[in-house]
Image (cartoon, helix red, strand yellow):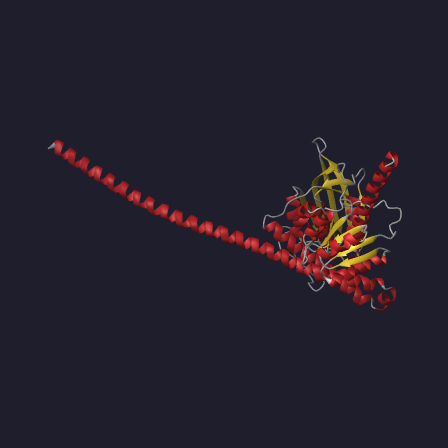
Amino acid sequence: KIIFLFSAIMIMGLGYMVFILNRSSKVKSNLNRTLKTQNLELTKAKETAEQLSQMKTRFINTVSHELRTPLYAVIGVTGMLMDDDILYKKRKEPLDALRLSSDYLLRLVNDILELGKLEGGKAKTKQLNFRIDQLLREMCSSFKSIALDNNNKLHVNYGKDTELELQGDVFRIQRILMNLVGNALKYTINGNVYIHVQTLKTIEKDGMYLSIAIEDDGIGIPPERQNEIFNEFSQLERNTSTFKGSGLGLSIAKKLVHLLNGTISLTSEPNKGSTFTVQLPIVKAVDEVPLCQKSNLDNPHKEYKVLIVDDNRINRLVTKNILEKNNFETVAAQNGKEAVDLFLEQKFDLILMDLNMPVMDGYTASKTIRSYDNEIPIIALTANDMESIVDKVMDAGLDDIITKPYDNVQFFQTILKNLDKKKSIKGIVDNLIKERGT
């Protein structure tokens, strides 16, 4: 009886174990099927999200390019009208308003493009040489009309022993400055905006920070709003008829500072003003040609012959007018093939090359010209985002990039810099020929 009872208990225990194992197997099998289904759904969702992100990036790039092209015409033609002293005196107010509106629209397009790259994880940093003093001069020049509009004064102060020749992501540093200074000018009326710049050495060997403080005596930011001021589309809801904007500037500035491994902080008091302080790791410039270098030409108004290549008739007109007004001789082509034919027929000192054109694009045209001449400066004059094309541009043999719409100061500095480079190379070759007598 004891053996029978023990056997029965064992059989029942084994049966229960088999039941549990079978149930567990079914549950496990169901879980595996569920996990596989969920993994497939997640994979599909991931692929869909990536496709949507790529579509969004392409859409932003396309829209920004299509907006920049007519903006180039608007800003260029407006500049042509403002250069006419008689007309400008008669129509000063509407022309100033037109220029201010077009500048605002350009900054908005650039902000949307930058936000798309940052959110899509496409933002990459590029280390280039630049001069911080020249960068600030160009920025102050572009903000001149906005400062006058609110009757503000813009000041730049350098700390003692500040390094001016630096190496870093100059495009991103410029964007940070543009957004912070633009924000300060927007919320300041009849006041002052100060840009304090200095370079600070770190404990590490050769370590250095670029410290920039943007100080204003504007309306200030209430303490309860200071934590959210860097959020996207965040704005001070105070007299919105006066203070307009997209609410993207500070958010993009913060994202860019973090992209560059820097820090940004805010101190503010209502009705007394605000100070945004940015610290970015930076290094001294190395022995390469700086990105933004003033020309050393003795006579910047000397006549040079420039080939303008652009499929847009209005853009050709604007570029042609700007150059000819400064004593440059110009010839225009409407596609790459026509540019190559003109290059083979005539002698040019410099070529301004659009990239997206019918018949033959700027990349192919530049490679073809380079097969004949390695010295003539070829500059991309394009509405494309500079960072997205810089490698492709350099691979095609172009020397530099000017993004449309551009500031006239930057435009001529880039042109003269490349003409100066050609002049230096030609001088070296001529000296070698003279010394060797051949």
Q: Nearer the viewer, residue 358 or 385?
A: 358
Q: Nearer the viewer, residue 301 or 408?
A: 301
Tell me the quadrant of the picture where the N terminus can be found. top left
User: Which residue is painted at 54% across and 55% down in the image?
Assistant: 52
| Image side of residue 429 versus residue 181, left or right | right
**Percent position (x, y) of residue 162?**
79, 39
Tell me the quadrant of the picture where the C terminus can be found. top right
User: Which residue is painted at 74% across and 63% down in the image?
Assistant: 313
**Percent position (x, y) of residue 100?**
76, 61
Q: For residue 140, say whether it is visible.
A: no
**Percent position (x, y) of residue 302?**
88, 51
Q: Nearer the viewer, residue 381 or 431?
A: 431
Q: Quadrant of residue 94?
A: bottom right
Total numbered labels placed on residues in the image: 0
Q: Furthest-left residue in view?
A: 1
| Image side of residue 387 versus residue 160, left or right | left
**Percent position (x, y) of residue 252?**
65, 51
Q: Is residue 168 above or below residue 40?
A: above
Q: For residue 80, say whether it is visible.
A: yes
Q: Furthest-front residue in view?
A: 438
Q: Is residue 431 above or below residue 86?
A: above
Q: Is residue 20 above or below residue 3?
A: below
| Image side of residue 113 versus residue 415, left or right | left
Q: Nearer the viewer, residue 379 or 369?
A: 369
